[in-house]
Image (spheres, grey):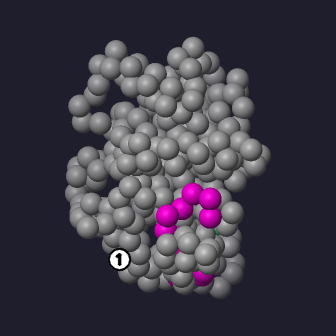
Amino acid sequence: TPLIDIRRLTRDYAGGGLFAKPSLTRALDDLTMTVEAGTIHGIVGESGCGKSTLARILMALDKPTSGDVLFDGEPLFQLSPKDLMRKRRDFQMVFQDPFGSLDPRQRVARIVAEPLHVLEVKPSRQEKRDRVMALLEAVGLTAAQADRFPHEFSGGQRQRIAIARALITEPKLVVADEAVSALDLSVQAQVLNLITRLKRERGVTFLFITHNLAVVDAVADQVGVMYRGRLVESGPARAVFERP
Ligand code: ADP
Ligand code: ADP
């Protein structure tokens, strides 16, 4: 069974109103797709096609108008609040601008440990510290850097910190929304290498959302192409990009 089974997902936004005529934007339109565990799944499409809406729904930060998402076989939007909380450790997100999402007043160790608050059984202080250190090392940073602040790091390093933070709850799925788009090409390549390694060595599943075809071409096993809230093409990256 797939890790993620997106079933006929539709999301309408109400617009207009007060001064403009009421209107409806169908951000997702009957979208169906699956993501297999242990793969990097790219989602590409122009701005406004519904990528961010899809990401928010997969993170359970937004609800579909209709349809559902089976996560490991469980329908996300039929779960009780308690069960949804339990599920939250299984999915994490990495955003485009890690500077915006890393609290500038916190030290790296605390930033990376932050998602652990969703765990029912909280690790001890020592265990937390050990996990943070192991992850920093896994993303190519050093233990000495754990006590620094985000502004002391380069853009690529900050993105590595964001990836470490996403992995701290040992999630099954990491949704990366334009996660390397703001980086220079050489730094992009380093972060993409890291993501490929995390897939290979830890079996992490990535949903890689971007408008940048070259990025998806470089890392994705499977690719879905979105257009106006719909999935208009999907398949192995090789086939979608017509590589020989
Ligand atoms: P992106 O292309 O990354 O989605 P946008 O600038 O389109 O960035 O959107 C930024 C934020 O504004 C998103 O959270 C999105 O949901 C929200 N947004 C986009 N379009 C509208 C809209 N028409 N009305 C209200 N919020 C919107
Ligand atoms: P993308 O991430 O591919 O740029 P989005 O998911 O942000 O696409 O947006 C899809 C469509 O939904 C766009 O037409 C956008 O303007 C609209 N939209 C997104 N968020 C909102 C919102 N909060 N309110 C109203 N419209 C929105």
Q: How many marks?
A: 1
Decide if ligand 2 comes within 8 Å of the CB at mark 1.
no
Asked if one can make out residue 53 in the rendered structure from this viewpoint, the answer is: no
Residue 226 location (% of width, % of height): 57, 77
When asked about the image quadrant of residue 208, the answer is bottom right
Q: Report the side of 103 relative to 127 (left or right).
A: right
Residue 179 location (% of width, % of height): 61, 51
| Residue annotated with mark 1 | 7
Find the residue positioned furthest to the front: 244
Placement of 196 over or under 26, stated as above or below: above
Placement of 67 over or under 91, stated as above or below: below
Residue 42 location (% of width, % of height): 54, 64
| Magenta stretch contains residue 229 | yes
Q: Nearer the viewer, residue 39 or 58?
A: 39
Amino acid type of disc 1?
Arg
Q: Which portion, as a residue range, is magenta?
A: 217-230
When asked about the image quadrant of residue 80, the answer is bottom left
Placement of 157 over or under 82, stated as above or below: above
Asked if one can make out residue 113 in the rendered structure from this viewpoint, the answer is: yes
Q: Nearer the viewer, residue 196 or 8?
A: 196
The N terminus, quarter of image: bottom left
Q: Which SS class for mark 1?
A: strand
The C terminus, quarter of image: bottom right
Placement of 242 over or under 145, stated as above or below: below
Query: Residue at horizontal 49%, vertical 64%?
Result: 221
Query: Residue at horizontal 41%, vertical 35%?
Result: 168
Q: Nearer the viewer, residue 116 or 205?
A: 205
Query: Residue at horizontal 43%, vertical 47%?
Result: 200
Query: Residue at horizontal 62%, vertical 43%?
Result: 191
Residue 176 location (% of width, % of height): 54, 53
Query: Alpha-carbon neighbours of circle 1 within 10 Å: few (<14), some, or many (≥20)?
Result: some
